[in-house]
Image (tube, rainbow, N blue to C red):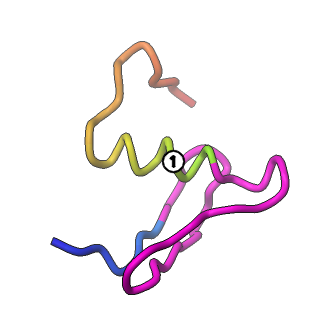
Amino acid sequence: MKFLSVSSNGFGFLRSNSLTFAPNFTVVYGPNETGKSTWHAALYAAFCGMRRSRIQSW
């Protein structure tokens, strides 16, 4: 299975954002506080789930 892109809809501060992957290899980089770790957490949650202690009700 190969993922071409992912979209977020309300994960952390990611609101209606998308991330498109390159055909063979993708590097996510950027300045501090631009969402790199949030994208990592979103992808991890999508594939592995979230621990209940990490879920916050808004």
Looking at this view, is 27 or 42 the one in front?
27
Occupied quadrant, residue 4: bottom left
Q: Is residue 29 magenta?
A: yes
What residue is rendered at 57% in x and 67% in y?
A: 27
50 relative to 29, above or below: above
Q: SS of the residue at dot 1?
A: helix
Q: Amino acid at mark 1?
A: His
Q: Where 43 sits versus 45, above or below? A: below
Q: Residue furthest front?
A: 24
Disc 1: which residue = 40
Residue at 45%, 24% in the rendered image: 55
Q: Quadrant of the N terminus?
A: bottom left
Name the spot of residue 5 as percent of width and height, x first: 40, 77
Main SS of the magenta segment? loop
- Taking the view exactly as shown, the residue that stands out farthest to the bottom is 23
User: Going by the image, does 9 lie left or right of 6?
Assistant: right
Q: Of 1 and 49, which appears nearest the observer? A: 1
> Which residue occupies 50% across, 72% down?
26
- Count residues near mark 1 (Cα–Cα under 10 Å), then give few for <14, some for 14-19, many for 20+: few
